[in-house]
Image (cartoon, rainbow, N blue to C red):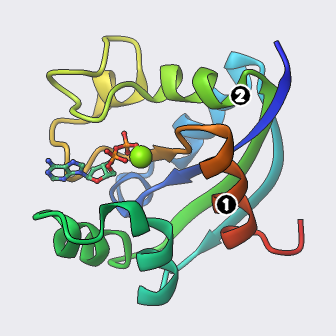
Amino acid sequence: GVTERTLVLVKPDGVSRKLVGEVVSRIERKGLDLVALDLRTVDRELATQHYAEHDGKPFFEELISFITSGPVLAAVVEGPRAIAAWRQVAGGTDPVEKAAPGSIRGDLALETGSNLVHGSDAPASADREIKLWFPNL
Ligand code: DAT
Ligand code: MG
């Protein structure tokens, strides 16, 4: 597969539940490469830009307050078909209805609003999100 980069986040629920190591371990076990790693607190400006596609949806305010509620681990991850590969490792958005057993969300999460991790969904969004989170990369 063609080499891609994707933006991965361990959201505040994952950091507070001490699952950073678990998530990094799954990235590495899949065979993907870590290009950048940064633990940081997200301000409203970054949060609303990151989730711009969801502006206006009923869960938007909840999403912004959640992602700004505590530190997140942001990572750029690289490898063949990295965007789809990471979304497979993460599992579907709803941890019960969509995420397969064996995925991070399928194994470790219960609710859509606190589903532990983020991954870019397409090459254009990966490019946009990586520039937003890691402008110097
Ligand atoms: P994903 O994170 O799998 O790319 P998404 O881009 O559709 O999912 O939505 C971004 C996040 O917003 C998602 O991880 C959790 C939250 N979210 C999505 N749909 C939701 C809903 N119906 N109710 C509550 N939160 C939701
Ligand atoms: Mg998404």
Q: Residue at x 58, y 60 (%)?
A: 73
* 3 sits to left or right of 84: right
- Number of other residues with Cα within 10 Å of mark 2, as a class: few under 14, some 14 to 19, many 20 or more: many
The mark found on residue 82 in the picture is 2
Q: Amino acid at mark 2?
A: Ala
Label 1: which secondary element: helix
The amino acid type of the residue labelled 1 equals Arg
What x and y, as percent, mark residue 88? 50, 20
Q: Is 13 above or below relative to 44?
A: above
Residue 44 visible, this orientation: yes
On whether ligand 1 comes within 8 Å of the CB at mark 2, the answer is no
Label 1–label 2 contact, CB within 8 A: no
Question: What residue did someone put label 1 on?
Answer: 128
Residue 75's spot in the image, x, y percent? 69, 53
Q: Is residue 98 left or right of residue 25?
A: left
Q: Quadrant of the C terminus?
A: bottom right
Q: Earlier in the sequence, mark 1 or mark 2?
A: 2
Query: Is any part of residue 7 visible from this angle?
Result: no
Residue 69 against residue 3 in the figure, above or below: below
Question: In the image, is 83 to the left or to the right of 17?
Answer: right
Q: Quadrant of residue 54?
A: bottom left
Residue under the point 80% across and 33% down: 4
Q: Nearer the viewer, residue 11 or 15?
A: 11
- Asked if residue 94 is positioned above or below residue 130 in the image, the reply reads above
Can you tell which mark lies on residue 14? none
